[in-house]
């Protein structure tokens, strides 16, 4: 089966579970000043799946993504990532697992101002350790290819101060994919993009689903993404609802 047939077929029906949340609560702060951000969240995400978490501002989307990405810990409940119970892991073990398997897209982009767009994308690979000449050349080409696919071939040597919001968001998206992660956690990844750029991003996400088995968890209010995801869940006041598990698979429309 060629790539186009795979893209039309959708994810495999029995892909292994990569993320498992059970009875997850999150509270920020203590006492009367505390805020309950998440209530009794149950969620599984399979390898190669793309899940959209929808909800208004203040609904808990960022809190949920931070827990899935191991940037924060749950107040109650269990979080299992790649069959590892996060609460039993040391801070260093969590950091190592994040570096090894998770890519992030932050709302604020979090680009390093003294690095070019190309260097920002290359950074996650560089942080893994010293690369020999051949590995460095391959990494640089991978970063350049991602930027080109996102319409940024002429902005590779630009520093973040010369990039507009759309360009910065696309650099952040390229950086999240450069390590070929098993999981991408993306907070409003298309909020500053026009329709053409949204298509580029969603097609690139789909390629990584099928070429690398990458799973995506996206927080979004952008309805342009909804026809491309495999499942849409609604988060309201920290409580999660969505389509039943058996209804989550949906063919993807991808331009190749």
Image (cartoon, grey):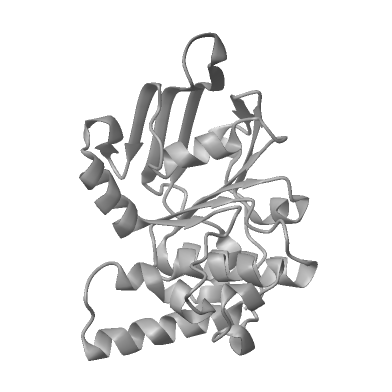
Towards the viewer: 19 or 32: 32
Compared with 177, 139 (above or below) is below
Residue 124 in which image quadrant: bottom left
For residue 248, side relative to residue 138 (left or right): right
Res 199 seen here = no
Task: Give the percent coordinates (x, y) of residue 232.
Answer: 64, 41
Q: Of all residues shown, which one is farthest toward the top?
A: 32
Task: Give the percent coordinates (x, y) of residue 239.
Answer: 60, 23
Q: Quadrant of the C terminus?
A: bottom right
Res 197 seen here = yes
Task: Give the percent coordinates (x, y) of residue 9.
Answer: 56, 61
Q: In the image, what residue occupies the spot 33% across and 71% down?
A: 125
Towards the viewer: 20 or 32: 32
Towards the viewer: 169 or 146: 169
Task: Give the percent coordinates (x, y) of residue 116.
Answer: 51, 79
For residue 147, side relative to residue 97 (left or right): right
Q: In the image, what residue occupies the spot 46% across and 54% down?
A: 12
Q: In the image, what residue occupies the spot 52% across and 35% down?
A: 63
* Labels in figure, total: 0
Q: In the image, what residue occupies the spot 41% across and 25% down?
A: 22
Compared with 93, 20 (above or below) is above
Compared with 162, 19 (above or below) is above
């Amino acid at each position: 089966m060629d790539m186009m047939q795979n893209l039309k077929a959708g994810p495999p029906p029995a892909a292994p579970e990569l993320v498992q949340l059970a009875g997850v609560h999150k509270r920020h702060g203590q006492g009367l000043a505390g805020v309950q951000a998440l209530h009794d969240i149950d969620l599984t995400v399979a390898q190669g799946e793309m899940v959209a978490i929808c909800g208004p501002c203040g609904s808990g989307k960022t809190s949920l993504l931070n827990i899935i990405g191991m940037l924060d810990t749950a107040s109650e409940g269990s979080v299992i990532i790649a069959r590892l119970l996060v609460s039993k892991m040391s801070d260093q073990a969590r950091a190592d697992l994040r570096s090894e398997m998770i890519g992030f897209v932050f709302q604020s982009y979090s680009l390093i101002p003294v690095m070019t767009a190309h260097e920002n994308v290359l950074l996650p690979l560089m942080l893994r350790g010293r690369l020999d000449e051949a590995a460095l050349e391959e990494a640089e080409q991978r970063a350049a290819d991602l930027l080109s696919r996102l319409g940024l071939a002429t902005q590779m040597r630009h520093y973040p101060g010369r990039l507009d919001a759309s360009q910065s968001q696309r650099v952040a998206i390229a950086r999240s994919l450069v390590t070929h992660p098993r999981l991408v956690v993306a907070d409003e990844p298309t909020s500053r993009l026009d329709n053409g750029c949204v298509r580029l991003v969603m097609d690139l996400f789909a390629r990584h689903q099928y070429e690398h088995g990458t799973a995506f968890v996206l927080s979004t209010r952008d309805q342009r993404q909804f026809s491309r995801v495999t499942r849409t869940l609604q988060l309201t006041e920290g409580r999660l609802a969505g389509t039943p598990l058996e209804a989550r698979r949906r063919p993807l429309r991808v331009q190749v």
